[in-house]
Amino acid sequence: MLNKGFVFFLMLVIICGNSSVIAQRHRQPDTTFRVIGFYQGSFADINKYDVSKLTHIIFCFTHLSGNRISMDNDEQERILKGLVALKKNHPNLRVLISFGGWGGCETCSEVFSTDKNRHAFATSARTMLLKYKADGLDLDWESPVIGGYKNHKATGDDKANFTLLLKELRKTLPPASELCFDANSFDEYLRLSVDWGNAMPLVDFVNLMTYGLPADAHGQTGHHSALYSSSYQNESVSKSVEALHALGVPMDKIIIGAAFYAFVAEHVDSINHGLGRPGTFKCNVNFNRLQETYTERNGYEYHWDSVAQAPFLYNKQLGIFVTCDDKKSVSLKTRYAIDKKLGGIMFWKLNGDTYREGLLDAIYQQTTSGKP
């Protein structure tokens, strides 16, 4: 579900997610505040994460087969069954099935343009939820009206058809099912892709993808998951939340996003430790690997932007710049969400975290304690 359409020139997506191993029973976070982890990993890794620190886990991804929702292969089915099996020891955990993803909606605009196809899709989604005993559906259509991956078809009718799809799903899915969707956070999407006034009453919450945020100019480094806007980074969590609030979206239905991955750029000069400077995309890195390799011992200096409330790394000898989230920044995001009475925080994705004392632990600590 990466917000790639407007990710600036230097950045590409990273895969993140391994959270803390279950060493002991933890009390669940306050279920009025959602902590949502997306999972796109292997069956073998499912039990390595401490899901007691989550309220929701979202399986990624299903896609269209004709006009029906479908698994890609047998391994996906095995993974989903494994995630649902976690509920045996964690009965409060909600397991949702995500549809679409970046590159996963090539035919969405065409298929969802008719009543017949929307009904067929909703009926197949209901069947899937009942078959696997999942708790709901997450829609990740990237993106109505404006398109996205490889110029997948998009039309001006997508906005109304997206609302009609949500309406059909709400009518068709089992009554207890949760329904949500993933939204890009930049202005064009917020203005053009969703009819917020008619869409939000139909869903339980919206996952605002406040990562992969574009810098102010292509080819310049910035923070891909800034909490606040700055002279180096106009797009931010706060800016997006305020925009949705102005559109009338209930604050308690907004879930902000944290990044369990980093973007790396090379050929970046040392002015301002590489921030706001020209460069070239190099690679993407999971948080767990970042902790092991992009270290002070290997020449990477840690810096903190006190305006954006975001960290970055710079290696002067190699001319490498890294934008990422860390434990401090995700803690601040979580506290921001709590103080603003938002619906919660989510992250892409669980597979990039460290097993112990990682980003999920930092989020969890904020949900179970008072203000720092």
Image (spheres, rainbow, N blue to C red):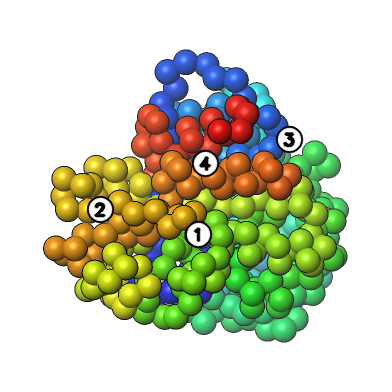
State yes or no: discs 1 and 3 in contact (Cβ < 8 Å): no
* Amino acid, disc 4: Ser
Q: Which residue is mark 1?
A: 307
* Amino acid, disc 3: Thr
Left or right side of 248 for 289:
left
Up/down of 5 relative to 358, above or below: below
* Amino acid, disc 1: Val
Q: Earlier in the sequence, mark 1 or mark 3?
A: 3
| Residue beneath the point at 62% across and 59% down | 238
Classify the position of the C terminus by image quarter.
top right
Q: Which residue is mark 4?
A: 331
Q: Which residue is mark 2?
A: 301
Left or right side of 187 for 273:
left
Q: CA distance from mark 3 to mark 2?
A: 38 Å
Q: CA distance from mark 2 to mark 4?
A: 21 Å
Q: Earlier in the sequence, mark 4 or mark 3?
A: 3
